[in-house]
Image (spheres, helix red, strand yellow):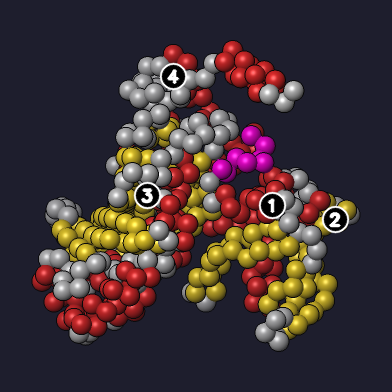
Amino acid sequence: MGRCVRLQKMEIDHLLNVEHGSIRMACNLQQDHYAHRADVLGIYGQNGSGKTTMIHALSLLKCLLSGDSLPQEAVHYITMGASQACMMFEFTLEDAGHKARAVYQVTFTKQDTNRLAVAEEQFKLSVQRDDGSWPALRTVAKVNMESEDILLLPRTRGKWLAECTGQSSAKLMVWKLLAFRSGGSFLFSSNLQKALTSVDNEDARQLLLLSIYGRFSLFIIGTRGWGPINMNAMIPFYFRLRNDNFLNEGSIPVDLIGPTVMPQKEYDIIRKTIEMLDCAIDKIIPNLQVELVEVGHQLLSDGSRGVAAELVSVRGANRIPLRYEAEGIKKIVAILQILIEAYNHPMMTLAIDELDAGIFEYLLGEVLQVFQKRGKGQLIFTSHNLRPLEKLPKQSIIFTTTNPKNRYMRLKNVKANNNLRNVYFSDITLGGESEELYEQTNQYEIANAFSKAGELNG
């Protein structure tokens, strides 16, 4: 059996509008921790109630596991009035038939008004014994990023790290402080991960495996990518391609207002991506195909030869530039290849914010149900469209609450024959849950406010 990492649980404290929130994936609820089948989670709730906050948390996780610096805007992520924000993620890991459970915890702090930094990180691990039993989680490494005299806690782990990597404690300390100043992780920094690649040790292998997951199998699509599509200016092509056992993932912006001049490598990636999505797109949008039409060559700013190409929509004999298609079609084209990857690969975790924006609700429900029934990877999404509540099992849906100290919950007392959408509406209007799901509004107050606001305009 090959490698696999699966996200099991997420917990955040003092991040944006969430003082505390905890979410368990559906497979974790069923104690099916190592299942190589679809694990879908939809997050629902009113505007500003913490749905996107969980997507931001996953974005921060990807940055840390990938050895990247935290984004500049993350300095504003700590809840107003709090001095720190914390995140905790639980994972199951498999490698060559060996199973493990891991917990990664990280604490953030503001170093100044312009930068968010990792103040502390901790990695815990439990490896299944040969008899199938599980020992308690043990601390592999706890890092105080600001400390200049203690590398790891417990101190013996600092000596272990120096011995197994062949690096001096002083050099490792320099790497740690560099990671702190750059706003990144030390445990998953490129320097340390490179040093661990030649280490034949269980702890090192699991750290490396989690880093690989973060770099190549954890994929986040935020709402920032939808803006250029809405303005009909650009489409971000999200992709994850394999070539000779090498994974390449990311996104490439392609102009919608005219041909895009791009390096040959990017042109080849988009062309390969379109080949893959054309196997499926006409099953989602009947009779539609997409082509990348080469219209010439042009020198790039570095003097290299670039390819000028334009995206074209093809419906039978009709060919038009993709920019003239509907917003929802362009969004599907942007995300379809990466969605196909998550459908086919158990180690893939794909998180999409506002998946429903611009997509016909019936189609959205059909696609999610297909993924749930036959897929292999993990899909996390936020949505305002309630159609998925009628198509997905109740354990695949999380709702936000009005309580910032307990921000996420699943509905209770939902019977097998209940329509979850109807139960949700009933709980909003009548209550019945342990937490309030919606901060009530009043139609008469809204109408009165509209009238008064209009009077201010003469």
In the image shown, does 381 or 346 lie closer to the viewer?
381
Q: Nearer the viewer, mark 1 or mark 4?
A: 1
* Residue ID for mark 2: 320
* Of marks 4 and 2, the one in the foreground: 4
Q: Is residue 106 above or below residue 164?
A: above
Structural distance between the alpha carbons of marks 2 and 3? 46 Å
Circles 1 and 4: CB atoms closer than 8 Å: no
Instruction: Determine contact: label 3, label 4, CB under 8 Å.
Output: no
Q: What is the three-letter code of the residue carrying label 4?
A: Asp
Mark 3 residue type:
Ile
Q: Quadrant location of residue 114?
A: bottom left
- Specify the quadrant that holds the N terminus: bottom left
Question: Dot 3, how many residues are within 10 Å of its Cα: few (below 14), some (14-19), or many (20+)?
Answer: many
Determine the CA span between mark 2 and mark 1: 17 Å
Residue range in magenta is 354-361
Q: Are marks 3 and 1 in contact (CB under 8 Å)?
A: no
Q: Is residue 193 at least partly visible in the picture?
A: no
Q: Which residue is mark 1?
A: 229
Compare residues 185 and 387 and report the one nearer the observer.
185
**Which numbered disc covers residue 78?**
3
Q: Amino acid at mark 1?
A: Ile
Mark-to-mark CA distance, 4 and 2: 47 Å
Secondary structure of the residue carrying tag 2 is strand
Residue at mark 4:
427
Going from N to C along the chain, the mark reached first, 3 or 1, is 3
- Left or right: 395 with respect to 95? right
Contact (Cβ within 8 Å) of mark 2 with mark 1: no
Q: Assess disc 4: are there few (<14), some (14-19) or many (≥20) residues with their C-alpha within 10 Å of its C-alpha.
A: some
Q: Amino acid at mark 2?
A: Ile
Residue 263 location (% of width, % of height)? 68, 77
Judged by depth in the image, the label closer to the viewer, 2 or 3, is: 3
Left or right, 4 with reference to 256:
left
